Amino acid sequence: MALHAREQDLQMTTDSEEEFTFSSESEDDEDLDDEELHFGERFDPAQDTFSEENVFPSRAPHTGAAQKHRSVFSGVENLNECENDQIPVAKRAKKTLSWREETDVDVAPKPRRFLPAREPGPQLSLADSHSPVSLFKLFFSESAVSNLCHNTNAQAARALAKGRKYSWTDVSVGELYRYIGLVFYMAMVKMSSIADYWRQDSLFSVPFPATVMPRDRYRTISWNLHMSHPDADTENDKKSGTAEHDRLFRVKPLMDTIRLACKAFYHPRRNLAVKERLVACRANTVMRRFMKAKPTKLGFKCFVLTDSSNGYTVDLSVYTGNDIFPTDHGLSYDAVMSLLDKKVLGSGYHVYMDDFYTSPKLLTDLFAMKFGACGTYRDYRKDFPRSSSNSLTKKSSRGSIRWIRDGPLVCVKWMDKQVMNYFEKFRTARGVSPPDCRVAEVISFLQELLDKGRSPSTLKVYVAAIAAFSETALGQSIGRNGLVIRFLRGARRLNPPRPPTVPIWDLSTVLEAMKGHPFEPLQEIEFKHLSFKMVFLLALASVKHIGDLHALSVSATCLEFGPNDSRVILKLNPLIHL
């Protein structure tokens, strides 16, 4: 039931011959175990608990398993004052609660009014006319771009002082806007390298970039582009390893400007969604995260608050490590609370989330802020109802529903498919309980998985799941044990990642073949071969994706000829292009 907002992430990548680092690589080791839990298995140790009745969840997409008991916890329909509002959930949970069936009647109080701080929607004057450029400048204002120019020129001067050999003139605001426009253009029109955008001697050359700026100018701006002042960067880098060090220092000036603009020029409607987003990044920084389940698998990990009606980003926070939030409520709790500001938003909003975030503590505190909340949840989360009275069982039919009301909160379950998860597999295979597992048993279990063809990355997720519920061995977590680490490294050496292979063909060879029989001379060849040649050249010149090229067809159902064969329309094969 968790509502997920739909949005399209604009990914911008530029070629740069100079890598830069946000912080020291030595800081990366301290987050490895929690990274596997938070982003591999999406487990929050501060909120999730384990018992013999509840097993560790599998969220990895390759398992193909779905959770047996689907659950949702909601405070949306109960945004009212009631006698139990001020009672902590942990204390109310001690009451004996019995699961009710879908036929039982629930008395739901009257919902609280929706009182936004501003009128929902765009915060723009209807009397003004807005062009795409003017709307873009709301988020990339001239003052922000001017600051970018100042810092970029300072970085270029610093590089030249160190002996860099290239021509440089200070970049202006107008020129930097043109540079940003080229970045957008290159994100939509893909070429194999930056130099190809300025090539003029090729069948596939594009004329637009050369009309904006020379190639060398584009590349020198890319090498020196800086959002913060280089002298301030040096001072921040000196604080590496301390609490004063800011990992986002180099991107914060522009990021904060965009965040403020997102809030200023649009006010969200009633339904909000908290979710995760991965922004593609190739910078050499320890803040890059890998999430196998995301379309963009490597980049900056962000927690985002979006308007569910259109996917608009209301606010965001970038994950920089375990110390991103100062409280001790856990990452799942703090990520949501950091995005919700009642003074900015108003009251009466409904916040939707998935089971990584949902907890009674979070929903109760949101209720106190006059926010409704709804999301799927996990049975083993702290303070969730654990009553077995009239609960779902293995014999319950698919679609069966049970629910419990506990003051302002409502918990609902329904039966879905069977689940098999990582830790349950380990416990069943080894015949041990979580606190009693030894390093030798873990390594033996991992060896069995490796013999069955499991990849090294899959083994790492198993280790993270086991470490979450096992006691330390010789003062170390299972995930940090030297023998386990050596085993995983050996597994990777035995099974190194292999890049996907594609058939290799030489374009120049194909084009050379088309100069001869049966494709030349054009006045004498069969119409079929002329069509083949025309379609192939058209595909090379215009296709954007391999799937589109594969879907091109010259079958009778995909060709449409005009009167007297004056024109022809080529259509994609609908059975392939889905």
Image: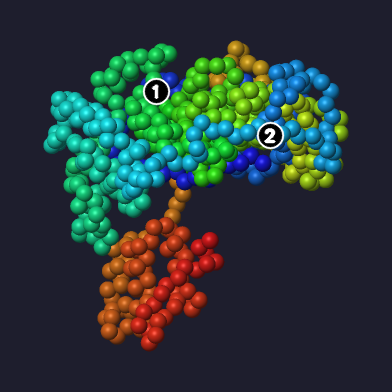
Q: Is residue 74 visible?
A: no
Numbered disc total: 2
Q: Does dot 1 land on a helix, a strand or a loop?
A: loop
- Give the residue displayed 28% in from the left and 46% down from the top: 182
x, y percent for residue 256: 38, 28
Q: Residues within 10 Å of mark 2 (few under 14, many from 20)?
A: some
Q: Does dot 2 land on a helix, a strand or a loop?
A: loop
The label on residue 544 is none
Q: Is residue 177 visible?
A: yes
For the residues labelled 1 and 2, the Cα–Cα distance comes to 43 Å
Say what amino acid the circle numbered 1 marks: Arg
- Give the residue displayed 83% in from the left and 26% down from the top: 97
The correct choice, above or below, for 282 with respect to 343 in the image is below
Q: Quadrant of residue 358?
A: top right
Give the residue pinned by disc 2. Answer: 111
Left or right? Give the position of 95 relative to 307. right
**Which badge, 1 or 2, is on the more N-terminal residue?**
2
Give the residue pinned by disc 1. Answer: 247
Q: Residues within 10 Å of mark 1 (few under 14, many from 20)?
A: many
Q: Quadrant of residue 166?
A: top left
x, y percent for residue 69: 75, 38
Residue situated in front as seen by the camera: 3 or 543: 3
Say what amino acid the circle numbered 2 marks: Pro
Left or right? Give the position of 270 relative to 135. right
The correct choice, above or below, for 532 with respect to 578 in the image is below
Left or right? Give the position of 374 relative to 109. left
- Give the residue displayed 38% in from the left and 74% down from the top: 532
x, y percent for residue 67: 70, 39
